[in-house]
Structure formats: structure tokens, C-alpha cells
Image (tube, grey):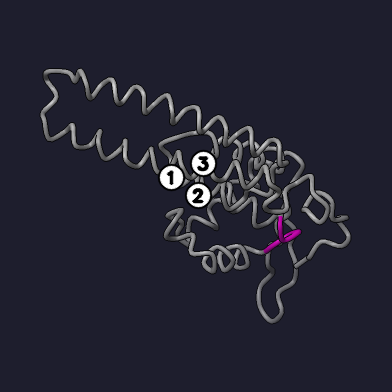
Amino acid sequence: MSATKLLVLGIVHLSGGAHGYQVRSELQSWGAETWAKINPGSVYHALKKAAADGLLTEHAEPGNSGPERVLYRVTARGRDEMVDMVRDGLRRTHDADMLNAAIAMLPMLTRSDAIAQVGERVARLEAELVAQAEWRKHPNRDTPEHVREQADLWAGHARTELEWAKSLSGRLSEGAYIMADDPGSWRTVPDHLKKSS
């Protein structure tokens, strides 16, 4: 899975249609080059690849004073894949870029779906922490002592992430954020009222 792909599909969808420059500018304004390691060239590549894969449609439009521009719109298949990627990013551990992208596109899920995916992340983190604790009690003899520091570092990260995930689940349960099944969400706004670029 690709964080760039998810974010590109999400921006195009939330915009109701967008040009490459608009997608790039939006992601830059979010600071995505830092937290999802996205560079400008990868945005254009992701748009072209998603269009070739049938996740986006391309519509040529005349430029204001230059060459034609391409307006991208998300297809039904693209929306389905985007939602699946948000789910996967929320529940899969050890992929910070996908987690960050999934958080950025969290409102693509219904509230109960988001809570379920975060709940699965919590369960995975708890199981991994148990396994790490057991490994630290009985490490492999061939493992150098200094390498065990990595396990301690990972366990510290995992405990912090676990605390965050439980907190997010609680906030979602209490009604935080406009989710896909809430009034005013991207799913409940009629297509003709969505911003078109």
C-alpha cells in the first residue's frame, strides 16, 4: 500500500475533482512531505498510475492561457480502494507513513468502521508488546546486547502508540470528527453541491 496513493485519491475525492497542481498544493499545505514522505514528483506519478489503474478518470480542460490541463475525478472503484486503504492503514502496525495517511483520510470511514479498525490496531499492539516482553525475558543467545536496545525502543514507541489508539477510539465513540455516516460528510453532501475545480 502507498501513502501517496491514498492521499492523492483522498484529495481528488474530497475536492470533487482536482488538477495535479491542486493536489500537490493541498498536500504541501498539510505538510505531507514531512509526515508521509511525499515529494511533488510522486504526486504526479500517483495520479497517472491511479488513472491507468481505473481509480481516477482524466478530463482534458483548456488552460487559462497555456496548454490543456487534466482534471482528475475518483471512480467508484477508486473510492472503494481508498476506503480499503484507510482501513488497512489504521489497523496495520509498523508502517508510520500509511498510519499518517489513514489518519488524514479518517473521515472516509463510518464511525463504527473506524472504531473497529482502531480496535484491531489496539489488539495487534497489545499482542506485539506481550511477545516483545517475552523475548526480552528470554532473548536469543546470538543476539548482541546492544541490539536488545532496539526492542526496548520499539516497545516504548508501541506503548505510546497504544495509548494514542485507545484515546482515538474513545474520541470517536464520543462523536469526535465528521465521519462518512454523519450529516455533512463527504457521503451525505449531494454531488452537485461538492466543490468542483
Secondary structure found at label 3: helix
> Dots 1 and 2: beta carbons under 8 Å?
yes
C-alpha distance separating marks 1 and 3:
13 Å
Residue where numbered disc 1 is placed: 96
Q: Left of 39 or right of it: where is 169?
A: right
Quarter the C terminus occupies: bottom right
Q: Looking at this view, is 163 or 85 the one in front?
A: 163
**Percent from the top left, x then y, of residue 168?**
57, 45
- Mark 1 residue type: Ala
Residue where numbered disc 3 is placed: 165
Magenta stretch in the rendered image? 14-18
> Label 2 crowding class (10 Å Cα cut-off): few <14, some 14-19, many 20+?
some
Q: Left of 196 or right of it: where is 135?
A: left
- Residue 16 lies in magenta, yes or no? yes
> Label 3 crowding class (10 Å Cα cut-off): few <14, some 14-19, many 20+?
many
> Label 1 crowding class (10 Å Cα cut-off): few <14, some 14-19, many 20+?
some
Whichever of callouts 1 and 3 sits on the residue coming sooner in the sequence is 1
> Dots 3 and 2: beta carbons under 8 Å?
no
C-alpha distance separating marks 3 and 2:
13 Å
Asked if 116 appears above or below 25 in the picture, the reply is above
**Percent from the top left, x then y, of residue 46?**
55, 51
Q: Nearer the viewer, mark 1 or mark 3?
A: 3
**Percent from the top left, x then y, of residue 183?**
83, 52
Quarter where residue 115 is shown: top right
Residue where numbered disc 2 is placed: 100
Secondary structure found at label 2: helix
* Residue at 62% in and 50% down: 105
- Mark 2 residue type: Asn
